[in-house]
Amino acid sequence: MILLLILPLIFSAIMGIFRNIFLSKLLTLIFSFYFIFYVIYSLFHTSQHFTPYFEMNALSCFFLFIEALLVLVVTLYQLAYFKGESNIGDRFNRYCIFYLLFIFSMSGFILTTNFGFMWIFLEASTLSSTFLVDYRSTKGSTIAAWRYVFICTIGVAFAFIGIIMLSKGSAPFGGTLFVSDLIAHAQAINPLYLKMAFAFIILGMGTKVGLAPMHAWLPSAHSEGPSPVSALLSGTLLNVALLGIIQAYRILESAHLAAFCQDLFMIFGLLSLLFSASYMLNCTNYKKMLAYSSIENMGIIAIGLSLGPIGYLAVIIHIVGHSLSKASLFLTSGVIEKMYHTKRIEGVKGLAVRSPLVAFVWILSFLSLIGLPPFPIFFSELLLIYAMIQSGHYILLCVFIILITLIIYGMGSSVFSMSFGKATHTKFIFKNSSLLLAGQLGLLLIMVVIAFYMPSAIHTLISNAVSIL
Amino acid sequence: MENMLILLFCLVTLVGEVKSRVSSHIKVIVWQGILLFLIFIFDSTGAPIASIIFIGIEVLLIRAIVIPIILNRILGSTESHFEAEHKLSSFYSLLIMALLFISGFFIAYGVNKLFTGISPLQFGMAISTILMGLYLILSRKKMISHIMGYVIMENGILLLSFSLLGDMPLLISVGVLIDFFIGILLFRYYTLKIFQNGYDKRGKI
């Protein structure tokens, strides 16, 4: 575990000293492979410690597994994505440095057992990814980066107030910020401190998750950043911040205050669906459309958490489905952007004529995201509907189905209008670009395979992660 | 004496609002830094020497000296000394700030009934300062004012942590300070970048 936390720092330092593109590519590639091998090893050895502050358990292993998988796919993709760009030298080198620092901060957040460190890693993830969003240094990307860093920093400041409340609540037990200690003593902590702490944490970390109405940074950051960055932000960063909220929720659940949290989850979840639906019906930019879809999916996950234990399995499956499908969509959107030189939906027509393979991956990723069987989101949404019926939330069920239908309609009409029709002019010559699509196909294949055959290690991991929730 | 310092800490934000210059808010931040240090000294009888040294560095050096210098440099580079960019008129803005200040007393009164073992006035004034900082961010158009609002909010959060905890573990405090400081440097970087590249067509710098 120590290597996982130290390697990105050492590699970043080496890249900073030597400033060589080949070396930067090599080191990011080495780290990505190390990361995935380490996580696969951890599937069979989930109980690991590194100082009292870092621990690997089933929940952290689950989140780390998704992160490692996406990091590998994105690292391979970006080798081809940035190829041929002018003046790439120093900019790409800096990109690789911040890319590894970003991965370090997310891994640190997932592995840490202490809320104080969680806060530090969360803020570090914002600071390191700001330069990734602003990679191209255009007017749009610079303003998006400013908006991203400012809004998230303020949000995370609110989360800090929540952490202070937790520490004050646990003062009779030495003011501990360790998750396990807080869970163990939860019933003895003043409930008012716990409620205030959770309210601030969901407000603060919810900003990073992209829950409405704190989502203002997300559409611009996701649409202005390069596609590999958008894929990582959407597929991993949102999950990471969500994990922080889940850890706080576990404490309140132990103190028998789950109902308070579930009400907040439901409010933020429904608001997120509402904001996404209103944009999806009038969307003009396909990367922004994907960003709003992330807000929608985080809303669905929040609703899943609001349903209590019945919804937990759905939440875990939905996290897998959303991360993999959304990464695939963002990476494919990067290919489309290179083909058509526009992010406007109107500017892209006849994708299936120009490149049937790109259109195939684009449509299949979309079908995966909206929950067509056998993709994971089909099962998660089915479970959510079942959970709503079981818990008697019939009004919620109606609102949920109406909003999801509107979102699928809005998104579907854009995806299909881009894919079919008379082809618009494209300058991109699609050759030697298997790396630009291989990763997405791999992610889609994984989702199909696990629907029919789930390896026992993954099955155990998911079961254990759900039981921790 | 301590209560006097706490009230002064919150009042200086209000005084900054009376003046219409951006630079007056920088003076507010300097005064808040000094007052925070004095409040901590009164608060922390018997605190470990390492904590006192760390807070001294954090509050006096970083918050009262370094950050105001950074803000002054941004101000100098972007030539935006005047505040004339309220979304509301100055009168209403001052009225809202005054209401937020008064709300601190009500919060203190409520907290006194609900919690034990905390300083209610410190808690109330801290929340009041956080809200004032947030109001500055929401009610202003210029980026520099947003940064100042953020720093004032962070000072309020530090006062809140004094009120609730006294001091946090040193390792975590160092991490929090580094993140806060890098955040300010990043804000400076982007404000100047947006200004120098002419991305600011609506005069928001």
Image (cartoon, coloured by chain):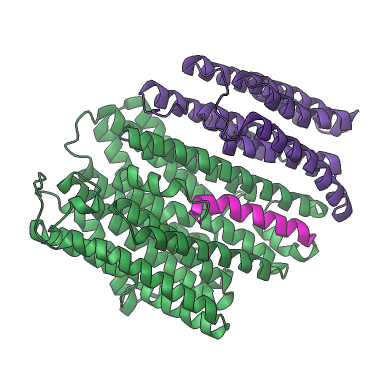
Chain colours: A green, B purple
Is B35 or A465 nearer to us in this picture?
B35
Q: Is residue B117 above or below residue A85?
A: below
Q: Is residue B158 above or below residue A209?
A: above
Residue that appears at 55% across and 85% down: A390
Count all numbered tags in the image, as a single digit.
0
Q: Hey, which residue is sitting farthest right in the picture?
A: B1
Q: Main secondary structure of the magenta part?
A: helix
- Residue A146: image quadrant is top left
- Over which residues does the magenta segment extend? A190-212
* Magenta-span inclusion, residue A458: no
Q: Is residue A193 visible?
A: yes
* Magenta-span inclusion, residue A200: yes
Residue A432 is situated, as x and y percent measured from the top left of the image, at 11, 48
Residue A138 is situated, as x and y percent measured from the top left of the image, at 31, 33
Residue A89 is situated, as x and y percent measured from the top left of the image, at 25, 29
Residue that appears at 69% across and 63% down: A183
Is A80 or B42 nearer to us in this picture?
B42
In this rendering, position of residue A348 left or right of residue A267: left
